[in-house]
Image: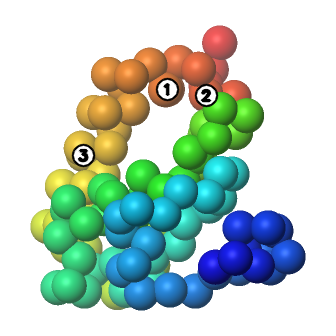
Amino acid sequence: MTRFHRKESKVLICTTLLERGITVPSVQVIVFHADHLVFTSASLIQIFGRAGRSFKDPFGEGLALVSGPSKALGACVKQLKFMNAASGAQRNSPDAKR
């Protein structure tokens, strides 16, 4: 983790430890088997919330690798879209249509 935080390593592979308490600015998040029963919508929101936690680069991306749809992932996406819209993140995104 220290090497990753100091940018000496470009990839950090971890368990759901990433779910809470770790903040590394300007990271992208990939969740492998995001449709697994171990992931609730709340845990996925916490994990994807690790992306884009920097004032310089607030628009992180999260990618869910799945075998098929899950209720938890669907609820997570719906909640994240709602929270981003409420915060104005969509309007301020570099990819937003002007």
52 to the left or right of 31: right
| Residue designated by label 3 | 78
Q: Is residue 44 visible?
A: yes
- The reply to whether discs 2 and 1 touch (Cβ–Cβ < 8 Å) is yes
Label 1 sits on a secondary structure element that is helix
User: How far from the left and from the top, in percent, is residue 14?
Assistant: 50, 86
Crowding near pointer 1: few (<14 within 10 Å), some, many (20+)?
some
Marks 2 and 1 sit apart, C-alpha to C-alpha, by: 5 Å
Percent coordinates x, y for residue 87 in the rendering: 39, 22
Q: Amino acid at mark 2?
A: Ser
**Mark 3 or 2, nearer chain start:** 3
Quadrant (top left, top right, bottom left, bottom right) of the C terminus = top right
Looking at the image, which residue is at 61% across and 58% down? 24
Q: Nearer the viewer, residue 90 or 3?
A: 3
Residue with the mark numbered 2: 93
x 39%, y 32%: residue: 84
**Element type where label 3 sits in the image:** helix
According to the image, label 1 marks what residue?
Answer: 90
